Image: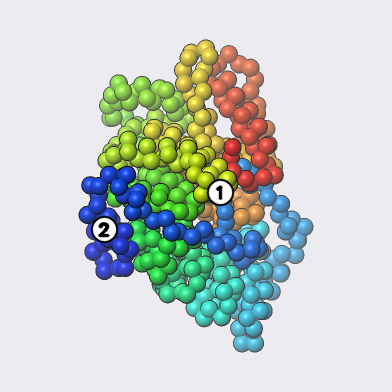
Amino acid sequence: MPDLRRQIFESGKTVSRKAASREASRSNSRASSKQNSRQSSRNASRQPSDDEDSGFLSDDTALSIGSLDDENPETENVDWPQELADRIAELLDRKRSSVQSREEALAAFCRLTKYHYAEEETRASITDLLSAFARSVRNESSPREMTLALRAIELLAITSCDDKIYENTEPLLTRTIRDSTSNGAKAAAIYCLGTCTTFGGAGEGGILEQMTFLLDIIASDGQSIEAPDDPTSVTAALQVWGFLLSEVDDFESESEEAVQIFIDQLDSGDSGVQIAAGENIALLYEKSYTPQEDEDEVSEDEDESDSNTNDDLTGGPKLIKRYNAYHNTPELERHLASLANVHSKRISKRDKKSLHSNFASILTTVENPRRGPRYNMAIDQDTNRHYGSTLTVKIGRHGLMSIDRWWKWVRLSALRRILQGGFAEHYFQGNRAVLTNLPVMMRMAEASGSGSGSADRQTARKAAKMRNSKRWAAQHSDDEGELE
């Protein structure tokens, strides 16, 4: 694939002065570049947390999902298929519709397809629905109608997994991202583009093309889409870029340039931008390690590191370093460590807490990419061997999902943003998009059965890990706040 930096800076697209001068200033010290770093990023604007209106602006950031056991208000709605059919008929008949009636119909469509897996109910109307949603986006009759239409496209894409959705929506979404006068609409369209690219049949070529487009937005601080220094759009681009990266197998030749762009965003004045950039850095480092193959020769240093990390704790394969994700990891580690311990009075208490917890986890992965999100080291008292426990998320009343790799985390975060309180319903009802993008869930009863007091050390370690995970899940089952 062509070099990312060359695509961005030789494509004729608008870039910020900081992005354009990055190559010339690469040799300068970080201390010098910090003096010139952007400090003017505004706090991301947040619309009211209405389920259908602002779901694309979810505040869920790294390591903040403790439970996906949200209350489903549609549990008792046994007549939802008929209600959905009526709403679809309203959306397709625009002759006598008003902006308000379309807003109500779109909100109902989003609610019903979010809380119910409606693949059968929407199958026959996919093309017509996409056309109706596109008109609402294109006409921009009201910000609410436009935003709801973008949400509806996302929900239809993740429900149907139709491989024609990407080609039918990409031109409209790209144009909206570039030309809309609303930064909120730009962010919504960026998220929608990511969903359609992943689940709408884009293929590897389409994924890589959109990653380059998104990296242009990030590197230019939003100027390439006429949203200069808008943290809402930049955060959306960062999060979607990471989601798309989780679908790419080989990113070796582009890793260096991408990490440098994300390092620049670590100096943002917005914590959401910083955390999203840090997540992508962790994911890029994780991708520099792949499972050991039969013909691989492992050095003594790698074998010792692998032993200390104990990758087999969760039954995973041993991971071997394939390439350097970035040329100056020690410098990056110092930068991440400063964010993990930031104490500036200009940062709110909440943002400070979020930066501390998230960047401590990101730093752990950069130091050893075998370690995933929220990796906690412990010592087996019998063998004096180091091992780790990882993040476990409660889903529904009986499910636990081990999130031991960053690719799992970014996918879970993306699916959680799209489906919100309907995530568990789609998972348990067999939504193909959800099931193929996440690891298999374990039942709590099955998991707790491993703690039998056996003398087998591995079984004991698994039991201890599960007890800790269940305790963590129980503490956060009613609260989606940040991890301590």
In the image, residue 325 lies at what x, y percent?
31, 41
Count the marks.
2
Residue 17: horizontal and vertical position, in percent? 30, 62
Q: Which corner quadrant of the image does residue 146 belong to? A: bottom right
- Left or right for 250, reference 438: left
Q: Give residue 333's mark.
A: none
Q: CA distance from mark 1 to mark 2?
A: 31 Å
Q: Which residue is mark 1?
A: 348
Decide if residue 387 is on the left or right side of residue 424: left
Q: Earlier in the sequence, mark 1 or mark 2?
A: 2
Residue drawn at x 29%, y 26% is: 298
**Neighbour tally class for label 2: few under 14, some 14-19, many 20 plus, Cα within 10 Å:** few
Write the residue at 48% across / 54% down.
270
Are dots 1 and 2 in contact, CB under 8 Å? no
The one of 25 and 346 positioned closer to us in this rendering: 346
Query: How far across and down, in percent of the image, does residue 72 sit?
Result: 71, 54
**Residue that numbered label 2 is attached to:** 21
**Furthest-bottom residue in view?**
96
Neighbours of disc 1 within 10 Å: few (<14), some (14-19), many (20+) = few
At x 68% / y 42%, what residue is drawn? 477
Amino acid type, mark 1: Ser
Which residue occupies the foreground of this view, 137 or 428? 137
Q: Position of residue 399 (x, y in %)?
A: 64, 40
**What secondary structure is found at the residue carrying circle 1?**
loop
Q: In which quadrant is the C terminus drawn? A: top right
Residue 480 drawn above or below residue 175? above
